[in-house]
Image (cartoon, grey):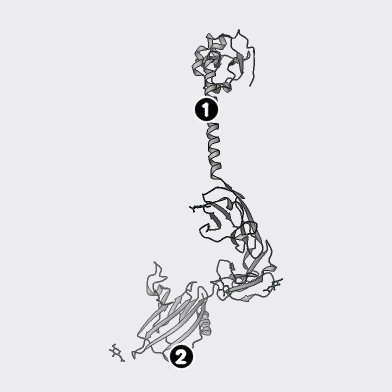
Amino acid sequence: MNKVATVALLHLLLSASGSGDGSTETALTAAPGDVALLPCYTVGNVTPTLTTWMKNGREVNMSDGVSVSSPSPAGRRLSVLHDGSLNIMGVIPGDEGSYMCASTLPDNSSFQAHVLLQVTNVPDTHPDCMYVPAQDPSQVQFNCSWFGAYPPPKLRWGEDGAFQVTNTLSVTMNSSLLSDGQTMRCTAQHQLLGPGTEKSCSLTLKIPYPVGEPLATALEATSVTLTCSETTSFPPANTVWRKGLQHDSIVSGSKYVLSQEGLVFKLTILNVSQDDQGVYFCHSENQLAIRELEVYLTVKKASSAYTGAIIGVFIAALIVGSAVIVAKTLYSSRHRICLGGDFGQIEEDRGDMLSLVESDDEQLFQDAVPRLPPVTNGRHTTLVQIHRMPSSDHEDAETADTSPQQLEDTEQAEEPEDLVTF
Ligand SMILES: *[C@@H]1O[C@H](CO)[C@@H](O)[C@H](O)[C@H]1NC(C)=O
Ligand SMILES: *[C@@H]1O[C@H](CO)[C@@H](O)[C@H](O)[C@H]1NC(C)=O
Ligand SMILES: *[C@@H]1O[C@H](CO)[C@@H](O)[C@H](O)[C@H]1NC(C)=O
Ligand SMILES: *[C@@H]1O[C@H](CO)[C@@H](O)[C@H](O)[C@H]1NC(C)=O
């Protein structure tokens, strides 16, 4: 911070335009870190008795920037000197603004001065690119703005052409020149960024792409809602619902309710009748293209619902009936059926073999009957047995005391007639 140089600079930039009757206007520019001296009464060497400073309409807080270690007035960043001027030790971004001082002179007359302070700054942010909806649909307008930079930056749309000194720059293009995937870029330059360093923003153009379910079904006399979302389009699309092969437009009313939640577009058809069956279009359009999502609505007669219900009840009765018959048959031949072992155990008992065999000895398996599951595969004359392979050890059988395997172990002399391996 070079105080002498800065004060000299400020005096150069000082462009007082005294109105002659107790009021002046001054514009100042300072860089961060500079000492800025905002003058109040500059005519003669009269010392005002009282001076107050306002910034953007509010009284300046003189304790701003006081550090805990040096709370004395000399350590303050902001102070009013005895001639009424405002001294800023070490300008920071944010000090810029419109200042006003009000002084009372010894002869009881009052005096006002306005000072516009600018702080040179280049923001950390990049410029903002945005789409501006235009009246003329054949034209597309984009704005590029970069606020907070001082002196004003230089902006340019596109890759060639001249930079313009401005905070905000707009470009208007004939939409026939736009294409899908095209990128619009705005580049910003600033003296504080140094040569070769630029900041930029860009927009990528996309044709519309409405998305939704292509088929819908409704029952007569109910209402149905068709939905369509359009999240892709840039510039943002105008998305509407249309009806029928003529693509007739649809208006909200007693029949249709059109609604929008964010980028989801809904069409609710009330009190659906057969006339409502047919094709609907989610019509999405921007300056690049028109795209449509086709939705076919099928209207089912209310009576057909009853038929369906009756068929459903009939099928259900049929299933229950057959279950009863199967259960009865199983029960009547229960003495011929035996399920050996717990199925969960089969995996553990490696070397065992599961097989279905004809049962000759009814007495032997009677104990197992109560453990039958309610439904089997219907082959009520077959029997599931676990047969131990000759190579396996007998440890498993010994630990599983209640397993019917033990029964089978005692029964190994009997050879199965029918062997099914799983
Ligand atoms: C200024 O006003 C004060 C009271 O408001 C008065 O006492 C004083 O004499 C005045 N001075 C002059 C120079 O008129
Ligand atoms: C776009 O820029 C133009 C001119 O620079 C300005 O008049 C307009 O307000 C801007 N529009 C928006 C939405 O910022
Ligand atoms: C946009 O371009 C088309 C064809 O390129 C032209 O017919 C039309 O007049 C242009 N519109 C404007 C507003 O320049
Ligand atoms: C539904 O439409 C039918 C004719 O299609 C009409 O008779 C009935 O009154 C309507 N119901 C309601 C609630 O609007």
Counting the numbered discs, the total is: 2
Q: Position of residue 415 (x, y in %)?
A: 63, 10
Residue wearing tag 1: 320
Residue name at image x 61 percent, y 73 percent = 170
Q: On screen, 271 above or below 356?
A: below
Q: CA distance from mark 2 to mark 1?
A: 104 Å
Whether residue 39 is visible here, answered yes or no, is no
The image shows residue 295 at horizontal and vertical percentages of: 61, 52
Q: Amino acid at mark 2?
A: Ser
269 or 6: which is nearer to us? 269
Judging by the rendered image, the residue that carries numbered circle 2 is 19
- From the viewer's perspective, is 278 left or right of 371? right
The residue nearer to you, when weighing 316 against 141, is 316
Viewer-closest of 221 and 50: 221
Provide residue 99's location: percent of width, then percent of height. 44, 79
* Crowdedness near tag 1: few (<14), some (14–19) or many (≥20) residues, C-alpha within 10 Å: few
Which circle, 2 or 1, is nearer the viewer?
Answer: 1
Asked which secondary structure carries label 2, the reply is loop
Percent position of residue 14, x then y: 51, 84
